[in-house]
Image (tube, coloured by chain):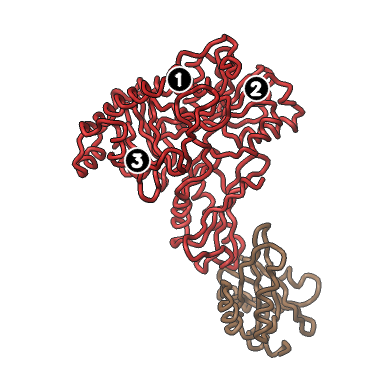
């Protein structure tokens, strides 16, 4: 029920984002979605890819430090209040969201959001208990282009 | 001629300066007498020194000429650390009237001690330093060296009082107030680190105070290396004469050597501090005029005699007589050191101190580099640390936290603010030989 996310440390200066992206592109790996968190000094690039093991190996061989984190993909109704309702559930269960970002892919009337929780397993349980749809990695991959 | 050079309003020299003009033969006689006494004193009261003499089969009686000093063992900075805090004292605490301390190589400070007589000698050599720089009774000295454990503040304070000048003990910092007093009191002389004065000059400009229009005529600068280009800038921007002075806590603090009106090398007050220049690799004494490491012996220190202390500062003797008429020897201004220590804002820093802090936080030593820059006259220290898998996290907060902890650990050891930057792996240059840990860009600006 969880996705593997790759994170990379980047210095916050021109040209730093291109190098790791080129490295995984050369390995034939398509990025399903990404998010970039930054401070004045440095940033963290977070990636979701189909073959994360290969991507991790390519990046590490090229000298990057890669962090592997489990994140949760949640299907939300793509209409006003869709996200707010989900957040209310998480808040009610006292689940702390470290960060979140939207998946680039949308299906039907749904939008997919990626959540990073302190406790992903409990988060998945809470979401399911409240009738929300947690997207399985295999299922997600079926919907994205090769 | 001398009167003109010294700008002495009272038409004479301060009596304390008399030893500066001793005929060489008389000076050597004083030095030999004092050397024999200090070797005897150290041998009798300092265990480490006695053990090293015994190892070499030497006794104090073996020192018959000044050249025999070369037979004596060296003292190095780690000796002070190893015997921390009081192991090198040659006087009982009941005779010690003052302690000072400075940073050491692993965070342990280095402690130095003074008897009443030591404080008097220190005051005398600092009075001679100020006289060398053209000050006299009637001058108003703004002492912007830090007061406290650092020897700069109190050393300059006692020396200026001994000279008969009026001391304004403002200490370091609070630049706007410094400038106000400079102007309102009609200050004629000022002492601080050269980088702090550069900052003061800049701030005065912002405040619309023209230092050139003030009575200030003498700047006495020390505690960190500075260039002739900086001197030219300071002198023209502030309308003063800027003098370089030299000293180190282990020997006495400021007051070991000073420039004179000629501004061509620094005179050693060598009736109290005996200088030698050695080959830093072999330890051999070099011929007069050759460049090497400065080694100093305190000839009159009571509480903490230093025998052949290796300063790690690289310089050479100037063999020609000085235009000012002083007979005491001169050295060229110090531009570099034989180890990797650097001085920032008057604080001695060894890369090993930074390493100890990084190690304490991370558990293993990451690749790092220290970059020194000068911004608006103020020295800035940046430490770049490569991110390691152990500390890397996908959360910004966790990285910010490690960054803050690294900076705090370094600041706690050094006592100065650092700019800590996390950088990508393998971005700090590796060289085949010794890693270049320190990049000093302060001369560029």
Q: Which residue is mark 1?
A: B21
Q: Chain of mark 1?
A: B
Labels 1 and 2 within one chain? yes
Dots 3, 1 in contact, CB < 8 A: no
Specify the quadrant of the image occupied by residue B292. top left
Q: Position of residue B182 (x, y in %)?
A: 66, 22
Q: Which residue is mark 3?
A: B80
- Which circle, 3 or 1, is nearer the viewer? 1
Q: Position of residue B423 (x, y in %)?
A: 59, 62
Q: Chain of mark 3?
A: B
Q: Hue of chain B?
A: red
Find numbered disc 1 in the image and state the secondary structure of the residue it sits on: helix
- Which circle, 1 or 2, is nearer the viewer? 1
Q: Which residue is mark 2?
A: B217
Q: Are there few (<14), some (14-19), or many (20+) residues within 10 Å of tag 3?
A: many
Q: Chain of mark 2?
A: B
**Chain shown in brown:** A
First in sequence: mark 3 vs mark 1: 1
Of the 4 image quadrants, the one containing the C terminus of chain A is: bottom right
Q: Position of residue B167 (x, y in %)?
A: 55, 18
Q: Is residue B360 left or right of residue A76?
A: left
Q: How many marks?
A: 3
Q: Nearer the viewer, residue A1 or B407?
A: B407
What residue appears at the point 40 percent right and 41 percent down from the top-left corner?
A: B287
Q: Nearer the viewer, residue B137 or B318?
A: B318
Of the 4 image quadrants, the one containing the N terminus of chain A is: bottom right
């Amino acid at each position: 029920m969880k996705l593997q996310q790759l994170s990379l440390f980047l210095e916050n200066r021109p040209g730093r984002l291109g190098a790791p992206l080129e490295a995984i592109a050369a390995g034939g790996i398509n990025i399903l979605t990404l998010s970039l968190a930054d401070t004045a000094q440095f940033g963290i690039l977070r990636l979701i890819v189909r073959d994360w093991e290969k991507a991790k190996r390519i990046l590490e061989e090229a000298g990057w430090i890669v962090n592997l984190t489990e994140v949760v993909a949640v299907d939300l109704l793509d209409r006003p209040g869709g996200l707010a309702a989900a957040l209310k559930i998480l808040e009610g269960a006292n689940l702390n969201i470290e960060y979140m970002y939207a998946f680039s892919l949308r299906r039907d009337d749904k939008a997919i959001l990626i959540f990073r929780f302190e406790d992903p397993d409990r988060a998945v349980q809470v979401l399911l208990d409240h009738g929300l749809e947690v997207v399985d990695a295999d299922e997600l991959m079926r919907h994205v282009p090769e | 001629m001398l009167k003109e050079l010294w700008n002495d309003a009272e038409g004479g020299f301060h009596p304390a300066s008399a030893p500066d003009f001793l005929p060489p033969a008389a000076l050597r006689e004083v030095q030999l007498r004092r050397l024999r006494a200090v070797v005897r004193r150290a041998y009798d009261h300092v265990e480490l020194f006695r053990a090293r003499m015994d190892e070499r089969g030497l006794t104090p009686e073996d020192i018959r000429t000044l050249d025999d000093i070369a037979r004596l063992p060296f003292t190095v900075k780690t000796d002070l650390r190893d015997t921390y805090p009081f192991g090198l004292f040659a006087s009982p605490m009941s005779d010690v009237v003052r302690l000072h301390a400075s940073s050491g190589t692993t965070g342990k400070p280095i402690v130095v001690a003074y008897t009443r007589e030591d404080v008097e000698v220190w005051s005398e050599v600092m009075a001679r330093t100020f006289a060398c720089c053209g000050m006299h009774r009637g001058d108003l000295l703004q002492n912007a060296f830090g007061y406290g454990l650092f020897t700069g503040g109190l050393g300059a304070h006692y020396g200026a009082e001994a000279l008969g000048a009026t001391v304004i003990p403002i200490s370091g910092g609070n630049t706007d107030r410094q400038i106000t007093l400079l102007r309102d009191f009609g200050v004629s002389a000022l002492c601080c680190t050269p980088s702090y004065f550069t900052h003061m000059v800049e701030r005065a400009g912002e405040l619309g105070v023209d230092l050139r229009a003030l009575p200030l005529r003498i700047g006495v600068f020390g505690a960190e290396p500075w260039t002739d280009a900086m001197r030219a800038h300071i002198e023209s921007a502030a309308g003063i004469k800027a003098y370089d002075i030299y000293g180190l806590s282990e020997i006495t603090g400021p007051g070991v050597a000073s420039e004179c009106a000629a501004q061509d090398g620094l005179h050693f007050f060598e009736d109290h501090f005996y200088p030698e220049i050695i080959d830093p690799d072999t330890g051999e004494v070099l011929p007069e005029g050759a460049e090497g490491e400065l080694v100093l012996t305190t000839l009159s220190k009571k509480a903490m005699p230093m025998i052949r202390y290796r300063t790690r500062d690289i310089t050479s003797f100037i063999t020609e007589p000085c235009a000012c008429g002083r007979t005491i020897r001169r050295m060229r201004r110090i531009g570099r050191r034989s180890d990797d220590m650097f001085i920032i804002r008057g604080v001695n820093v060894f890369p090993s101190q930074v390493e100890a802090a990084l190690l304490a936080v991370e558990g293993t030593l990451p690749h790092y580099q220290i970059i020194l820059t000068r911004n608006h006259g103020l020295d800035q220290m940046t430490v770049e640390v490569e991110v390691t898998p152990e500390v890397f996290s996908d959360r910004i907060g966790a990285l910010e936290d490690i960054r803050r902890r690294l900076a705090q650990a370094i600041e706690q050891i050094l006592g100065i603010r650092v700019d800590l930057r996390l950088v990508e792996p393998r971005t700090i240059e590796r060289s085949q030989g010794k890693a270049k840990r320190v990049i000093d860009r302060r001369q560029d600006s």
